[in-house]
Image (spheres, coloured by chain):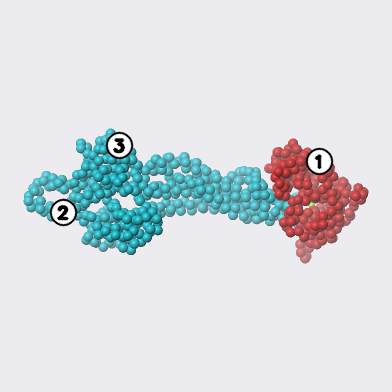
Amino acid sequence: MYYTDILRRSSRSLKSAKARTLLTALAIAVGTFALTMTLAASNGAQSYVNKIISDNFDPAELIVAKDQTVFQSGDRTKPKEYDSSFVSSVSNAGATTQTKRLNDEDLAKIKSQPDIEQIRLGTSVNLRYITRSGQKKYVGTAQGFSPAQNPQILAGKIPKPLNNKNILLPEAYVSALGFSSPNDAIGKSVTLVVSRPFSESTVRSLAQNGTLDSSKKIESAFDTATLEQQFIIVGIMKKPMSSQPGTELYMFIGVEDAQVLNDYATLGTADYHKYAFVYARVKDGNDNNKLLAAKKTLQSAEYFVNSVEDTQKFLTQIISVLRGIVVAFGMIAIIASVFGIVNTMYISVLQRTSEIGLMKALGMRKRDIGKLFRFEAAWIGFLGGIIGSLSALAVGTALNPWITEKLDLGVGNKLLIFRALQIIILIIILMIVAILAGLLPARKAAKLDPIEALRTE
Amino acid sequence: MIVVKNLNKAYGKKDNLFLALKDVSFEIPDGSTLAIIGKSGSGKSTLMHIMSGLDHPSGGSVVIDDQELHAMKSRAMDNFRAKQMSFIFQSFFVEANQTCYQNVMLPLEIAKVPRRHRKDMVLKALKAVELEDKVYNLASNLSGGQKQRLAIARAIVNKPKLIFADEPTGNLDSTTGDLIMSLLFGLNKKLGCTLVIVTHDEELASKCLTQIRLKDGSIERMSKTKESRKK
Ligand SMILES: Nc1ncnc2c1ncn2[C@@H]1O[C@H](COP(=O)(O)OP(=O)(O)O)[C@@H](O)[C@H]1O
Ligand SMILES: [Mg+2]
């Protein structure tokens, strides 16, 4: 028999037992639905992570630190030895800790590595406040702007490079600072203010010459230890579609401008010219081998190094675990449905005993009869796969806008991303599984004795 | 020409040994009609199954057109059956949820008849059994006589040399049975195929050129009509 004839006959016999076929296929469809959704969700999560990464990091850069805890790794259950060269800091949970930081010497050492092209500080300036004439004062964080960053702009544009006391503001500051619209803010100036804690020696000298004789004087003395700088607004950033939580209100200034503010704010403290981490750009770092080689050299110099990929892996890890769990459940559903296929196929063989006998009497080959039933099983797998994946596709497409809104993923981002290739592969796997399930019943059919099958009595 | 020589068929072993066929020998020329008659359990079906290669003899041989049937490899045997033989059964064995057209198509698919010839052959066969107005009807909607006619159409569609019919009228009332038989004999004349009919209907048997009467697995009597002696 020709393949097409076998194929047609097998689909016809399925059609003649519609309810049974459909119920068996539905069992497979449930598992397929779960698997398709899981794949789509992990595609979406993956691409979301990738977007965060590509919007914020340059893949040719390595993040170099002196302390493992910068990368959320390392043992935090053991007491940490006190190091007098660093100040202690307080974590979100209120725990006191010390983070070893890089100093200028380290920077020079990193820079001297032959495969390191350039070093960029990830300077973050804690402003005392930002304001503009006649407006309220607001707290804020100014970040050194990385050329790899790609925020969406509502008004103005990002100069390359961003420097010379230009600033990018998040849209939330527009009305807060009294502008009527994002466009209205462009070209206007704002004041950034940082302050410096007094060092012991300064306070002593001021007290000695009697300057600090009243509380008012003390306050004004503090005021003199602030640095005010005017910045020109060159761009208003849209609320980011994808960002690490808590960074939505970052304003961006040039790296050198940020350094000036930071140096002022930290002068005389243990934080002065100390860096939790720096970005080290690797020569031809888009070549993964070179990136890894550079990472090794830095690691052998006792630094802790993360590539963008490591960061990505860290974020993706959680996704993979969740995906694994749901995939396991989907597999269980499919394995359960395998028994359904075996059962259905056995019934089919029993019901069609005389038909099989006749076909054998008419000279149909054993293996063609086996094929007939294996194809039938494959059809069931195909049908279940199609029903499951198409309904997942329909439900997912319908839910996507709602999910995007609820999870605040930002316009254009989707949680569920369906990939045709994945679905096709899934269906092919299902068909193979179904064929395997149909193997025994098909063997039974092929081995049937036509004389027995055609006995009338 | 079919030559059956010293056929034996034993079922079971040792103490349970049962001989269903004992030293059966006969010859029938091409295009002839043969009736195998006898009581229930006399070995009629067993003989037919061995003659058609569905069953293996314990001894002896069946030679069809100089080919020893049971010496063939299974592939050659399947091919031989697909191209040269067909069957008609007491309980029709037509596929109820397929159309007449699809039912008659089956032997052509099995024999790998080129697709372009198929439709023609199917329609011709259905016409020969006067089912041309039921081509796309489901077989389940047919009456018993129509079902058997459909089975006959399926049997003749690939122009076999040999048609085996096991009690073809057994499930039909006598009028319909007569109609079916005259149809079969007509086709035998028209197409020249050899017809082997298993029956316990004496009247039907008498219409065949050769009759073989089996009793307990042996030929009790073999008779030929005058017509056949002339041949
Ligand atoms: N597979 C078998 N095993 C044992 N005995 C069998 C088998 N098939 C048929 N027989 C016996 O062989 C004898 C002939 O059977 P069969 O050819 O079917 O008779 P008929 O068709 O004339 O009624 C019967 O007695 C039957 O019981
Ligand atoms: Mg019988």
Residue ID at (28%, 62%):
A79
- Point out which mark residue B72 bears: none
> Quick check: B221 above or below A193?
below
Residue ID at (85%, 49%):
B32
- Using the rendered image of the protein, determine whether residue A87 is visible from the camera's viewpoint: yes
Residue toward you, B76 or A430: B76
Residue ID at (79%, 40%):
B128
- Label 3, on which residue? A182
Element class at badge 2: loop
- Please state which of the two labelled residues, at mark 2 or mark 1, is closer to the viewer: 2
Label 1 crowd bin: few (<14), some (14–19), many (20+), radius 10 Å:
some
Subunit bearing disc 3: A
- Using the rendered image of the protein, determine whether residue A311 is visible from the camera's viewpoint: no
- Residue A249, horizontal then vertical, whole percent: 30, 44
Label 3 crowd bin: few (<14), some (14–19), many (20+), radius 10 Å:
many
Q: How many angstroms separate mark 3 from mark 2 (CA)? A: 41 Å
Q: Which colour represents chain B? A: red
Subunit bearing disc 2: A
- Label 1, on which residue? B176
- Point out which mark residue A199 bears: 2
Q: Which colour represents chain A? A: cyan
Determine if the C-beta at disc 2 is less than 8 A from ligand 1: no
> Quick check: B124 above or below A350?
above
Subunit bearing disc 1: B
| Amino acid type shown at disc 3 | Pro
Q: How many angstroms separate mark 3 from mark 1 (CA)? A: 95 Å
| Amino acid type shown at disc 1 | Thr
Which residue occupies the extreme left position in the image?
A209
- Residue B159, horizontal then vertical, whole percent: 78, 47
- Please state which of the two labelled residues, at mark 3 or mark 2, is closer to the viewer: 3
